[in-house]
Amino acid sequence: MTPLLELIDASVQLGGRAVAQSASLRVHSGEVVGVIGPNGAGKTSLIRAALGLLPLAQGAALLGGDPVAGLSPQARAARSGYLPQGGRIAWGIEAWRLASLGAPDLPAAQARQVALVALEEVGAAHLAGRSVFGLSGGEQSRVLLARLLATRAPLLVCDEPVANLDPAAQLETLACLRGRAAAGAGVLVTLHDLNLAFAACDRLVVMQGARIVADAPPHQALTPQRIRDAFGLAATVVEGPYGPLLALEGPRRAHADL
């Protein structure tokens, strides 16, 4: 089966500095792939390069089997939807109108219906008629996610989609993305919360020092040794009431001056 997204030996440079080196990964239909790593590891640069938003210094990026650099903007949009980190909203329009911008290929009435369904899917149907400028940061994040879902793209790429959300909304957002994967989409998502990544993803791509150091199911990717190496944290896998959890302990610090 042709991957929805494929990076082959990809390297990215910004300002003369390598921010991703010799990276290879695939995303197939029906799976949620998480990209994790400490700040500055290259996660955002890697996914932006995969979508053709940053140039590659080396290697190849393919969407649906075709080089992304050779695809028109319309063809890229038909194959992938992207939710950037800290998405900005420029206009104080109603939430449903913002969500409908994800479906510019549809007649207005159909785009509105798609937007309303997407808002329902993210738990924001009650916000449909409100101005997005009157919403909280977390509510705006849900509306932006609905705009992504309204694209109906086979590949959904999300950069830190749960960063501004409370714990319940974080779980709902990831459940929503998992639902899209169950319906046949491929999902690529960057996350900082290791337990959310452990629970929500089928595979985890771990980045450290601009390189991919693991690409495996969560229990294989997030070993105690790799967590120690990549994040500087001690970790133990424990069985919780809803499945395995990572018990994390930060670096010990002196407290004599407290």
Image (cartoon, helix red, strand yellow):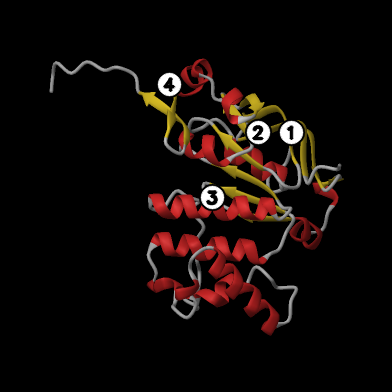
Residue under pointer 4: 235
Q: Is residue 202 left or right of residue 132?
A: right
Determine whether label 3 and label 1 are within 8 Å by CB.
no
Rounded to the nearest angstrom, the CA distance separating label 3 from label 1 is 32 Å
Q: Is residue 105 above or below residue 40?
A: below
Q: Quadrant of residue 111?
A: bottom right
Amino acid type, callout 2: Gln
Q: Which mark is residue 186?
A: none
Residue under pointer 3: 174
Q: Earlier in the sequence, mark 2 or mark 4?
A: 2
Amino acid type, callout 4: Ala
Q: Across the whole image, how many numbered discs are drawn on residues?
A: 4
Amino acid type, callout 1: Ala
Residue in the foreground of this view, choosing between 127 and 238: 238
Label 4, secondary structure: give it. Answer: strand
From the viewer's perspective, is the residue at label 2 or at label 4 nearer? 4
Q: Is residue 25 above or below residue 32?
A: above
Determine whether label 2 and label 1 are within 8 Å by CB.
yes
- On the image, the x and y values in percent for residue 197 come to 53, 37
Residue under pointer 1: 57
